[in-house]
Image: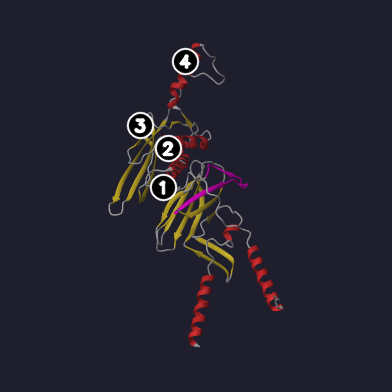
Amino acid sequence: MKMDTKTCLFTAVAATTLLLTGCAGQIDNTRGKATVYEDASTTGRVGGVGIESQDIVAVTDEMMRDMLANRMLAGRDIPPRIIIDNEYMRNESSSVVNTNMLTDRLRIELNRASNGRMIFVGREYAAMVQKERDLKRDGAVDGGTIRETAAQAGADYRLAGRITSLDAADRSDGTQSRYSQISFEMVDMELGTIIWSGLYEMRKAGRDDVVYR
Amino acid sequence: MIRTLIAITAATTLLVAGCTSLPSDSTRLEGRTAPVEYNTVVFTDYDLSRTWTQGILGSGQTYRLSVENHGRRRTETGTTEVYAVLRNHTDFDYRIEARTQFFDEDGVPVDAKPVWQRSTIPANSVSAYKTLSTGTQSLQYRVEVRELE
């Protein structure tokens, strides 16, 4: 079979056009490989109406930034001593969540970001510290290299908070809705006044077939 | 003859209408290769807003949301507050996520890791996004906005 000149020319032009079209863009706009890892700060493949990783990351990030903009907490010449732990953080909601995740992330992120503008007292480690102090005082171990103090640090402020929720369900199609509220309050440990408050709220709806543990 | 003419006109109109907007997954969108600028608000979700210069009919823009205003100011503790006022041009509420990356004067990324904040922009309305830095040095910002998945 022999092609005439016209057909040859047409085929060549078509092939060149296709080639040029294929080479026109430098961006390969395709999805990457599937993975089991997901970004903790975004909604994952499994999602329900409860408090999830993206909520914990978002709420603690928002509270941290707000605290660092508060003059009484982050603008003092002598940095205040603060306790942030789970002792006074209550979960009164229908969501299953370990409140240590909130207080731990908040304290750690604040401690890193404040860079000395706030001092954090590890009250939950008080027994551990006391044990070491006793060993030093008894002479079982030496005094260490930093300093000696009459007592462990007392706190100026302590964080308290509460998680509450309001549930609703549509029986016709099984859709569930949950309004969740997470409140934080920084309490003056001498006066009992509240010097800072933060509130995070959200409402989620969906077919609640997700199990939280 | 007239029917043929109408059919050709309709087909041409449809073709031209289809070509006036590049799709959000097009690699010819400006946002994909535009240099990173500071003190700006960008839509990283091209379904919400996209601009192009090399479409079949030249340049163009399609948007559902736009940025009305944005800026920064210092807080009383010296941290930086960034705000962006977003406008919804559609008849539907839009749930979005936004985050801010902070850079120092040399363009070096500083501050805590940016976190997506969720918000709703009501139909045909405006809504403000605000965030705060954690550091007290002079900072530049880049706000990224996308639709909530």
Residue B96 position, x and y percent, is: 45, 54
Judging by the rendered image, the residue that carries numbered circle 2 is A102
Q: Residue at x 38, y 28 (%)?
A: A190
Q: Is residue A110 left or right of residue B110?
A: left
Q: Earlier in the sequence, mark 3 or mark 1?
A: 1
Residue B141 position, x and y percent, is: 55, 50
In the image as oriented, which residue stretches furthest toward the front? Answer: A1
Q: Earlier in the sequence, mark 4 or mark 3?
A: 4
Q: State whether residue A161 is above or below residue B123.
A: above
Q: Which mark is residue A47?
A: 1
Disc 4 secondary structure class: helix
Q: Amino acid at mark 4?
A: Asp
Dot 4: chain letter: A
Q: Amino acid at mark 3?
A: Gly
Distance between mark 4 and mark 3 Cα atoms = 32 Å
Q: Earlier in the sequence, mark 4 or mark 1?
A: 1
Q: Residues within 10 Å of mark 1 (few under 14, many from 20)?
A: some
Q: Nearer the viewer, residue A202 or B66?
A: A202
- Viewer-nearest of discs 4 and 3: 4
